[in-house]
Image (spheres, grey):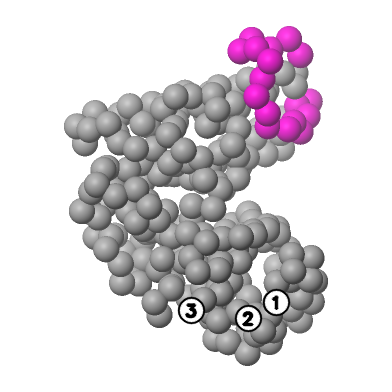
Amino acid sequence: MTSIVINIGNTNIRFGHFIDGKCDVSWIINTKPYGTRDELFAQFSMLYQTYNVDVEKVDKIIIGSVVPQLTHIISSALYKIHGIEAIVVDRKTHSPIHHKSNQMGTDIFANLVAAHFLYPNKKKIILDFGTALTASCVAEDGEVLGVIIAPGIITSLNSLVKQTAQLPEIELTKPKSVLGHDTVSCMTSGMVYGFLGMVEGFIDRINEEVNDDCFVIATGGVSHVYQPLTNKIDIADKLHTLKGLYFLGKDK
C-alpha cells in the first residue's frame, strides 16, 4: 500500500511518501503564507514531480494538523490531485495510547503513538524540537504519563532578534566553544547550550518522577543539532511524527 502522510505544523508542513509502512522520501514546505486550494494544488503537483511520486499508485492520504484553518484547504488540494478523500487523524483517533486530555495536539499524540509501536516494552520520552519544544512521556502499556511544553528554540531565537536592535540573525549550529568571543558565537552558545541544559534537565526530572530510565527519542526541526551533544538522547528521527500519523491512519 502506498500512502501520502502530511504533518501540518505551525512553521512547516512535512510530507512523507510511504510504501508498505516505510517512508522512502520526505520533504518540507513552509506553512506560511497560507495558500489557496489552487495555489497548493500547483505547488503539490510540482513537488510530486520533483520527488517522483506516482499519483496513480497512491492508495491513501493521511493528515495530522495543528493548524485547523489549513486542514480543509490542503485536503481539498490533494483531492483535486488524487480524487481521494484524506483521512484526518487526531487525539480522538483510536489507538493503544491512553490519555485524559481534551487539548492534546495531534503532533504530540502522533509522537506518543509512534514511540509506543516502534520502541515497545519500555517507558519513552519524546522530545519534539518544533515551534514549541515539547517533552512527552508514555508508559509501556500506552498510558500517557504527562507532557511538558516550553518555548521552541527557533521561536525563542526569532523573538530575541526581533526584540533587540543590534543582535543579528544566526544559523543554529554546534558552537566551537561554550564561551563566545563575538556576538554570533555568544548567541549561538546561548541558544544551543542553554536549551541543551533545559532538555537534559527535562530528561533527568522525568526519569526521577517516573522512577525509570526512559528511552529518549528526539524529533523536529533542529533535533539534529542537539542529539550529538548529549548522551541522554538515544535516537534522533526527523520522521518520527509522520510515522505516528501513519500508524493512526493506516487501517482506516
Q: Is residue 168 located in the magenta-colored stretch of the structure?
A: yes
Of the two numbered discs 2 and 3 in the rendering, the one whose residue sits closer to the viewer: 2
Could you tell me residue 69's position as x and y percent? 58, 72
- Residue 102 quadrant: bottom left
Identify which residue, 169 or 193, lies in the foreground: 193
Above or below: residue 247 compared with residue 181: below
The quarter in which the C terminus is drawn is bottom left
Dot 3 amino acid type? Ile
Say if mark 2 contacts mark 1, CB within 8 Å: yes
Above or below: residue 119 compared with residue 205: below
The residue at which mark 2 appears reads as: 57
Could you tell me residue 154's position as x and y percent? 62, 40
Could you tell me residue 106's position as x and y percent? 44, 62
Is residue 78 visible in the rendered structure shown here?
yes
Q: Residues within 10 Å of mark 3 (few under 14, many from 20)?
A: some
Compared across the picture, whether 109 is left or right of 237 comes to left
Residue name at image x 21 percent, y 36 percent: 210
Q: Which disc is residue 26 wearing?
A: none
Alpha carbon distance from label 2 to label 3: 17 Å
Q: Residues within 10 Å of mark 1 (few under 14, many from 20)?
A: few
The residue at which mark 1 appears reads as: 54
Dot 2 amino acid type? Lys
Say if mark 1 contacts mark 3, CB within 8 Å: no
Compared across the picture, whether 194 is left or right of 121 comes to right
* Of callouts 1 and 3, the N-terminal one: 1
The residue at which mark 3 appears reads as: 87
Above or below: residue 55 compared with residue 13: below
Dot 1 amino acid type? Asp
User: What residue span does the magenta drawing correspond to?
Assistant: 165-182
Alpha carbon distance from label 2 to label 1: 6 Å
